[in-house]
Amino acid sequence: MRSRHRERHQIGRIGWLRAAVLGANDGIVSTASLIVGVATAAASKGDILLASAAGLVAGAMSMAAGEYVSVSSQSDIENADLEREKRELRSDPAAEENELTGIYVQRGLDKELARWVARELMAKDALAAHAKDELGISEITTARPIQAAVTSALTFSAGAAMPLLAVVLSPANRIVLIVALSSLVYLAVLGAIGARAGGAGLLKPTIRVVFWGAFAMAVTAGIGLLIGKAV
């Protein structure tokens, strides 16, 4: 009977998962911190809504631009390395075969088998073999700037909308408390979802995002109080 053993790995999600978790986390933390800072400076509810809405839009655009530039730089480096590898394969294929053979020997194959594997893989797709085993570039890890930018912008907006909604639903004298507590709950849920999607344990990622979210809000609350007293 034919075995149907199938392994499910999470590494294929790393590109979009990283951008999604970072975007949503940043949306919650930055917007909630902005709201708490403005509210503790004794601003009106209308001013708080205006500031947080502006923060949502500016943050989403900033996240999209930052991710696009960052991941595009990674993509440029990958493409440059691949072009260099193409030139080397054209100019000295024997040396490239020796190089790939050495990589497989270092991984534990005997030299004769390593050379046979290198030769077979290069006969099928030499560039793909060198990209994966020499450069560490594969379909899973390839940089995708547009995907990262769109994911970051959308998830930032979704995260930022949560504390903004809390402001709308809160009485003016309870904005700081309700926004802070609800945002910590959102962060805990986000940390758990990200950990579950990535196949990691739940406790450590959840504690990590909640701690840094609380720290950020505490700092901006302190600054808001100082500015409020000063003006």
Image (cartoon, rainbow, N blue to C red):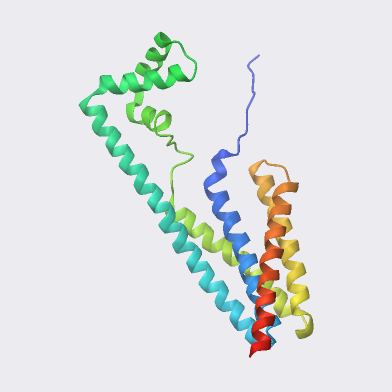
Q: Identify the image quadrant of the C terminus.
A: bottom right
- Left or right side of 15 for 80: left
* On screen, residue 178 above or below 187: below
The residue drawn where x is 72% and y is 52% is 206
Number of on-image labels: 0
Which residue occupies the extreme top position in the image? 112
The residue drawn where x is 34% and y is 48% is 76
* Res. 121 in view: no
Which residue occupies the extreme left position in the image? 91
**Among the 4 quarters of the image, the one containing residue 139:** top left
Expressed as whole percent of the image width and height from the top left, the position of residue 58 reads: 51, 73
Expressed as whole percent of the image width and height from the top left, the position of residue 108 reads: 50, 16
Expressed as whole percent of the image width and height from the top left, the position of residue 228 reads: 67, 86
The residue drawn where x is 37% and y is 14% is 115
Expressed as whole percent of the image width and height from the top left, the position of residue 97 reads: 32, 20
- Left or right side of 89 for 25: right
Q: Identify the image quadrant of the N terminus.
A: top right
Say which of 18 and 225 sits in front: 225
* On screen, residue 225 above or below 99: below
* Res. 109 in view: yes
- Left or right side of 142 for 125: left
**Among the 4 quarters of the image, the one containing residue 32:** bottom right
The residue drawn where x is 38% and y is 18% is 101
Say which of 36 and 150 sits in front: 36
Which residue occupies the extreme bottom position in the image? 231
* On screen, residue 36 above or below 231: above
